[in-house]
Amino acid sequence: MQKNKSNIVVVIGAQWGDEGKGKVTDYFAARANYIVRFQGGNNAGHTIILDDKTVKLHLIPSGVLHKECKLVIGNGVVVDLRVLIKEINMLKKEGLSTNLLISDRAHLIMPYHVDIDYHLTNYQNELAAGSTRSGIAPVYADKLYRHGLRVSDLLNEDLFRIRLQKSYDFNKALVENVFKEKFEHTYEEICEEFLGYGSIIKQYVANITEVLSSAVEKDEQIMFEGAQGACLDVDHGLYPYTTSSNTIAGQVEAGSGVGLNATKKIVGIAKAYLTYVGRGPFPTEIKGDLEEKIRDVGQEYGTTTGRARRVGWIDLVQLKFANQLNDFSEIILTKVDVLSGIEEIKLCVGYKVDGKDFKGVPSDIYNFKNITPIYETLSGWASLPDYIESLDQCPEELKNFVSRVEEVAKVKISLISYGPDRNQTFKV
């Protein structure tokens, strides 16, 4: 999708933080449809002064003085719900905007993360980074351990209880066995407290990728607000005296879930079908003889492990999502030859969850496990010529397949690979 670069503004502290970003952000916010936080947590703050009002915020973006501006907390932000709800209530009391959207993929700071931040600072001693002790480093660690808790988990009580137990047990063991400190929390107290928070914030939760992708297509004004400063970036700053997230402008896409790469050539690679080695849910998975046939013809075995890959029909909902995240200039479609000889070929063009249409890709395990793919069935192609220079030489059935992939996933296919030889590729 083409973008007007002047409609996308990224405000980043160019030094060590505290550069007065709040004032600058508020200046741009007057012209913006969306203000987006994309990293960090309540370990950073900004102050906005208007007449006799002084507003101090740590999580909610700076555009609170502009009622038409949507305030977005992206997936790259880690959220302390105690702090967030306090800020929401403060804004309501002051009569300021709470036009807030929270990513369903944002991670939650739990009470034990704050405790661990204190213990960690003491443990690291002179190598400690000068933490605000807000739980930021521990929650980012849990995110990478893959037992972190996300906003979407809160909206499903059964799932939240299961996932909290895993996180709780790990962090309790960490406090007691590594830091040799007393663990101050009970599972039930935390569970009930946070399920209560879930009911409060539910009205603000959204799929931010869908929201911002739509805004970009409409050429709306989006401003991305960084926290801390570029020199505190966890990869590029004075490590270990840094913050725990990427603070540079390159984090914008990852931390907000939308691709903004119109000035770059971004090439995506997609197979004409899907394969997956992991143990997670796989909505379009094929079982039985056809799975074996595709696997054998395509030689779908892990390069490192030799494990047989799981095989499924192409998922255009997933491919569209990948395009929203990366903003592909073009897609190269591979292994179309593997599907030759299959009488009917399916394409997943949508999802249903619990019998209802579901827009986009679910952020939580429960909904993902309960996806029912909506399929379109196309006639397959019997065989392909030995040498192909253009799509015009291909069977009509393959042309229809390519056209439908482009249409549903909203991507442009530029090249097609039809065999293992390096020369078995043609331009579309």
Image (cartoon, helix red, strand yellow):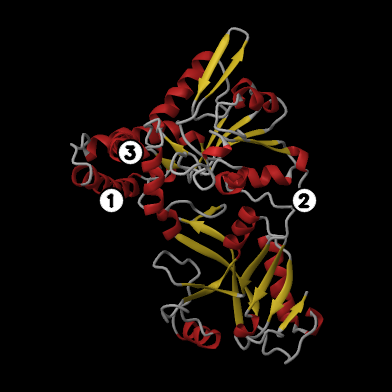
The quadrant of the rendering that contains the C terminus is: bottom right
Please tell me which residue is depicted at 71% across the width and 73% down the height of the picture: 402
Residue at 54% across, 59% down: 351
Closer to the camera, 58 or 412? 58
**Marks 3, 1: nearer the viewer:** 3
Query: Is residue 117 toward the left or the right of residue 5 in the image?
Result: left
Asked if 405 appears above or below 294 in the picture, the reply is: above
Proximity of marks 2 and 3: CB atoms separated by less than 8 Å: no
Point out the frontmost of discs 2 and 3.
3
The amino acid at mark 2 is Gln
Residue at figure coordinates x 57%, y 52% from the top left: 359
Where 221 falls versus 415 (above or below)?
Answer: above
Residue 138 lies, in percent from the top left, at 36, 42
Secondary structure category for the residue under label 1:
helix
Residue on which the image places disc 3: 113
**Residue tagged by mark 2?**
2
Amino acid at pointer 1: Lys
